[in-house]
Every structure is written in C-alpha cells, then in structure tokens.
Amino acid sequence: MFLVVFRNRKRADIDGAAYAADAARMEELARAQPGFVSFKSYTADDGEVIALSEWADADAARAWGSQPDHARTQARGRADYYAGYTLYTCENPRTHRFESPAL
C-alpha cells in the first residue's frame, strides 16, 4: 500500500463552485485510475483540509500525480485555490487495527 496525505489551506478568495467542480472531477478520475484504493477528505474547524488517498503502490500514485488532467488541475490549484499545502507520502506504513467484536 502507498499512502498520500495532502494537507492544505484554501485561499480566502477562491471561486468555491469552481473548486468543488474540479475536486469532484478529480475524485471521479482518481477512482478510475489503475491502483486506486480509497480517498477521504476531512476539514478541521480552522479550515485546514487533510485528504488521504491510498494506492496499490508508489508507481500507481506517481502515475496519478502525472496524469494530464490531474496535472492541469494541480497547476490551477496552485494558481487559484491554495494558500499553501504539504504532500506526505509513505510506502507500506506501519498499520495497527482494532475492530470491536459484535455485541
């Protein structure tokens, strides 16, 4: 498994409708990519967003990062949407699981 964590803050002046449309289109496109496993996004009370995507391996994640439509939307994000972001990646993260037994 390859994990990508995209931590970001939006600019105050973004076009919210345009961002939402781009985000929905990118999620749909990502889900269709070979090696895609899952995607979830969380917004903190202070506006910071954490987006988590899981991929089968590093090659699948890199292919997504360079997919032409995604690359164009990334550039639009830097120009129009994000005040700043940090991207973290990790191959085969140490994983601990707990599942409560059925009551």
Image: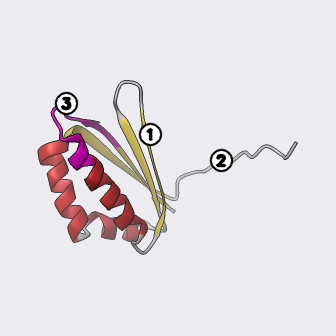
Indicate which disc residue 67 carries.
none
Asked if labels 1 and 3 touch by Cβ distance under 8 angstroms, the answer is no
User: Is 12 within the magenta?
Assistant: yes
Against 67, residue 14 (above or below) is above
Indicate which disc residue 12 carries.
3
- Compared across the picture, whether 103 is left or right of 78 comes to right
Q: Position of residue 35 (x, y in %)?
A: 45, 71
- Compared across the picture, whether 34 is left or right of 11 comes to right
- Compared across the picture, whether 76 is left or right of 32 comes to left
For the residue labelled by badge 1, is the local secondary structure a helix, a strand or a loop? strand
Q: Position of residue 86 (x, y in %)?
A: 29, 42
Q: CA distance from mark 1 to mark 2?
A: 21 Å
Q: Position of residue 102 (x, y in %)?
A: 85, 46
For the residue labelled by badge 2, is the local secondary structure a helix, a strand or a loop? loop
Residue on which the image places disc 1: 42
Q: Amino acid at mark 3?
A: Ala
Comes first in the chain, label 2 or label 3:
3
Against 13, residue 22 (above or below) is below
Q: CA distance from mark 2 to mark 3?
A: 37 Å
Colour option used: secondary structure
Q: Amino acid at mark 2?
A: His
Q: Residue at x 35, y 67 (%)?
A: 29
